[in-house]
Every structure is written in C-alpha cells, then in structure tokens.
Image: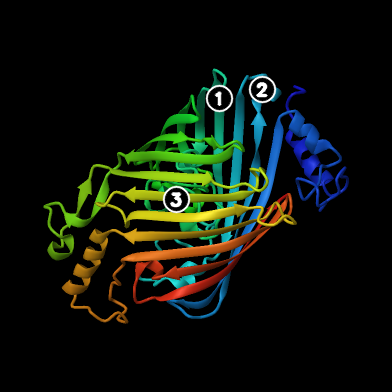
C-alpha cells in the first residue's frame, strides 16, 4: 500500500481515538480542537499534508418586539461542516497543489420567515439567522483542485465550489445575513454562495504591489437548490453559465502593516430570465395579462472596502477596522436593485480579552422600483386597497437591518456571539412593524 495515503480506516480510528487518548485532552482550553490532538496523531497527519476539519455552528434568535407576527417565540438553526484541506505536494509530490473538500448539513427553522416577514412577500435576504436557507439538507459544498505556478503568480482552481468562495469573498462575522458574506448572492438568482456548490473554476493572477486580477466561469443550474440534489454531480438541469471578473488590492498600511482589502467586480449570466414588469411588447404585464418579456441574460456589479485604521500598541491583531460593501443588480429581473452595508469591527477591545471582538453593522436592501410598480398594478387591477385582505399584494420598498454583537473567544475552538438586531420594514413592507431580535451564535471546532 502506498505509505503516502492515509486509508479511511485510519481516519475513523483517529476520530475514535479523540475520545480515548489525547496529548492535549479533550476540552483543553489551549488546544486548537475540542477533541484534542489525538495523542499527537492529528499533528502527525497535518505534517503529512492531511488537515481534516470538523466544525459546528448554531444560531438562535428570538423576536422581542415587532414583526408581522408579534408572538415572542424563538428559532434555532445549525450547520455541520466536515472535510479538509490536503497538501498534494506532501502527499503525492505535486508541487504547489492542494485538494479542498467541504460537506455541509443545515437544519432548523428561521424566525425571519416564520414571524418577522409578511408571508405574502417573504424575506429580502436579511434573515436574522444567516446559516438558514438554500435547503436544509446535506450538500457537497466544495470539491476543488487548486494549482499554483511561478511562485504563486498564477493560481488556478477548478471543481465544485460556491462562487462566493473566491469572488466577492468577504467572510462572515455577523449573524444577520444581509451583513454576511458576498452581497451578490443575496439577491441575484444566478450567484450561489455557500453552502451551494456548482461546477466551475477561476484563474487568478497575483500582480505586484499587492494587487490581483481574476476571472471565473460557473455552471448555472437551479436544480442544485433542490433538497434532494445536494450530492448531484451531473449537469442535468443546467440553464447557462455565470461569468465573473474581479480586481483587488490587499495592502498593509503604515509601519505596523495594518491590513486592508479592496475589491471591484461584476458578473454576467447568459441564461434567459423573465422581466419583472414588462411583457414581450414592452407593456406592463399586469395590465395586459401577457407573458413576461424574456431577457437574454442578467448582470450585476459589486465593490468592497475594508481597512484596519488603528492598532493596540502596534499589535495588528488588535484594533479598529471599517468596512463598506455595495452590490447593484439587474433592474429588469431582480427583486432588489441594490444593497449596501457599512460597519466597524474592533478586535481585542480589552487587554484582559485580546482575542474577543466587538462589531456593529448597518445594511439597506432596496427593492427594485419595477417590482413595486408591478405589485401596485396587481392590486389596482383587482381593486384591492386593504392591506389586511389576504388577496392584497403588499408593496415592498426598502428594508434596513442593524446588528451589534460581541464575540467571546473562550478557547481556540469555542466562540460565543450574543447579538442584538433591529429590522426596519421587514421584507420592505411599511405596514410590518419594526422588529427587535436577540440572537446567539455558537462556533465549535472539533
């Protein structure tokens, strides 16, 4: 047997050993992992190129006040992640190559859908529990091969992966979805962020002065959103391709080297789409009763900036960072025409707790005026003007979301994030009462 390959039985033995032996015992406050180092086996596997990763995230939320349904209830969602990063240079001798695997499972219910938004309109993408959605099921989120050339100047990645893992990639440090991850995936029906992966790839060129340029192409296949297609590997149901381009700058500013990240990008999808407002003759479809105009494609742009502006005693791991994020969508076919967010993150706010962080974020989700007009024409055509009539189509305008939270980094493997969120006009409907929500995120690395 090839001694460079760790068989699956060894992996199972490793997991079992976590409960029996540990050089760092289970639940050690100094360990990287909750299950310890497996009597040194985990470190040995890392040295050989096998970085197995297991984690769990739960998000709870309760509405204190407001929303469409004023019932003071709570909801719980969670996500389990398993997979790894495998250094193929150590394992197979392939220079500057690695394999990435991530399998995810989501479950639970979202209070935004259940209580906060009018069920006749649904949400706009500001779920107060960001790990809900895209089907509560198991999925292959990432199965990708990455190869670098010329001292990392050229970086190629292909496989099954979310678009947001490489483009408009900002990470997620908020529980409210409108402040989490790539904005484009919140309103664009052709851009899939995690946990949904699709076949595709990208080519990235790292340029001088901490700049880069990258382009990518990804399968557009709506059947991948279906609950039973989490492990679907065929391209049946494919409707087109999403093409993406991005330029970026990742400077380190000042003598301390304060980190920054700046991005500007856009996408084009070549699949057909229905016009929100117009029929095939260019008239309002609600008045004519004709089928919607069929568009030849969809597009959008985005921009992001984040910059650390202070340190604590020169320590760049602590200090204040500011961020701003904007996305604009195709007005002809999208629910939103734009979304924006701003915020601040202070890492290490107290000397006694240098690993903690405090953050505040604000976002606006602006409804496409063409969609609002379409809703108004619907009600006028049916002579509906009473919001409480079940047949009435509520008019959507804009929703505003805010979150403030504190991250308690209790150990390297356990983080608690209590938070307070405020939603003005949930679902973009003025008649829905503003909502105040308390939440709690728990991140665990096994």
Kind of element beneath mark 2 = helix
Image vertical order of residue 212 relative to residue 307, above or below: above
- Badge 3: few (under 14), some or many (20 or more) residues near its Cα, within 10 Å? some
Image vertical order of residue 209 relative to residue 340, above or below: above
Q: CA distance from mark 1 to mark 3?
A: 31 Å
Q: Please tell me which residue lies in front, 337 or 284.
A: 337
Task: Tell me residue 314's x, y (percent).
Answer: 66, 43
x 46%, y 60%: residue: 362
- Badge 2: few (under 14), some or many (20 or more) residues near its Cα, within 10 Å? some
Query: In the image, 7: left or right of 98?
Result: right
Q: CA distance from mark 1 to mark 2?
A: 10 Å
Kind of element beneath mark 1 = strand
Q: What is the count of numbered marks?
A: 3
Quarter placement of the N terminus: top right
- Labels 1, 3: front one: 3
- Labels 3, 2: front one: 3
Which residue in the protein does label 3 denote?
A: 324
Q: Please tell me which residue lies in front, 45 or 442.
A: 442
Which residue in the protein does label 2 denote?
A: 89
Mark 1 or mark 2: whose residue is earlier in sequence? 2
x 77%, y 41%: residue: 12
Q: Please tell me which residue lies in front, 278 or 419.
A: 419
Which residue in the protein does label 1 denote?
A: 147
């Amino acid at each position: 047997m090839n001694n460079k390959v760790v068989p699956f039985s060894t992996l199972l033995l490793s997991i079992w050993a976590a409960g029996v032996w540990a050089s760092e015992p289970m639940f050690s406050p100094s360990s990287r992992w909750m299950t310890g180092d497996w009597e040194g086996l985990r470190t040995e596997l890392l040295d050989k190129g096998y970085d197995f990763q297991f984690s769990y995230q739960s998000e709870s939320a309760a509405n204190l006040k407001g929303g469409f349904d004023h019932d003071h209830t709570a909801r719980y969602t969670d996500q389990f992640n398993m997979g790894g990063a495998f250094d193929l240079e150590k394992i197979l001798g392939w220079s500057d190559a690695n394999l990435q695997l991530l399998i995810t499972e989501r479950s639970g219910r979202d209070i935004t859908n259940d209580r906060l938004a009018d069920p006749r309109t649904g949400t706009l993408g500001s779920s107060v529990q960001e790990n809900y959605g895209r089907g509560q099921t198991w999925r292959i989120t990432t199965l990708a091969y990455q190869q670098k050339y010329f001292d990392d100047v050229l970086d190629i990645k292909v496989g099954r992966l979310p678009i947001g893992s490489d483009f408009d990639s900002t990470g997620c440090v908020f529980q409210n979805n409108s402040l989490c991850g790539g904005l484009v995936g919140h309103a664009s029906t052709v851009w899939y962020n995690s946990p949904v992966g699709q076949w595709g790839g990208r080519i990235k060129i790292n340029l001088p002065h901490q700049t880069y340029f990258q382009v990518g192409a990804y399968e557009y296949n709506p059947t991948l959103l279906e609950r039973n297609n989490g492990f679907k590997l065929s391209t049946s149901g494919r409707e087109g391709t999403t093409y993406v381009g991005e330029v970026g700058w990742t400077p380190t500013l000042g003598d301390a080297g304060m980190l920054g990240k700046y991005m500007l990008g856009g996408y084009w999808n070549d699949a057909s789409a229905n016009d929100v407002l117009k029929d095939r003759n260019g008239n309002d479809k609600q008045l004519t009763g004709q089928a919607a105009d069929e568009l030849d494609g969809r597009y959008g742009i985005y921009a992001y900036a984040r910059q650390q502006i202070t340190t604590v005693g020169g320590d760049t791991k602590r200090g204040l960072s500011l961020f701003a994020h904007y996305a604009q969508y195709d007005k002809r076919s999208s629910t939103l025409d734009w979304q924006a967010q701003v915020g601040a993150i202070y890492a290490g706010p107290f000397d006694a707790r240098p690993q903690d962080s405090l953050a505040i974020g604000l976002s606006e989700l602006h409804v496409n005026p063409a969609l609002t007009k379409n809703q108004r024409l619907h009600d006028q055509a049916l002579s509906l003007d009473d919001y409480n009539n079940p047949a009435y189509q509520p008019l959507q305008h804009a929703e505003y979301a805010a979150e403030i939270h504190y991250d308690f980094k209790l150990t390297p493997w356990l983080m608690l994030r209590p938070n307070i969120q405020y939603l003005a006009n949930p679902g973009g409907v003025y008649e829905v009462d503003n909502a105040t929500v308390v939440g709690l995120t728990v991140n665990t690395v096994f």
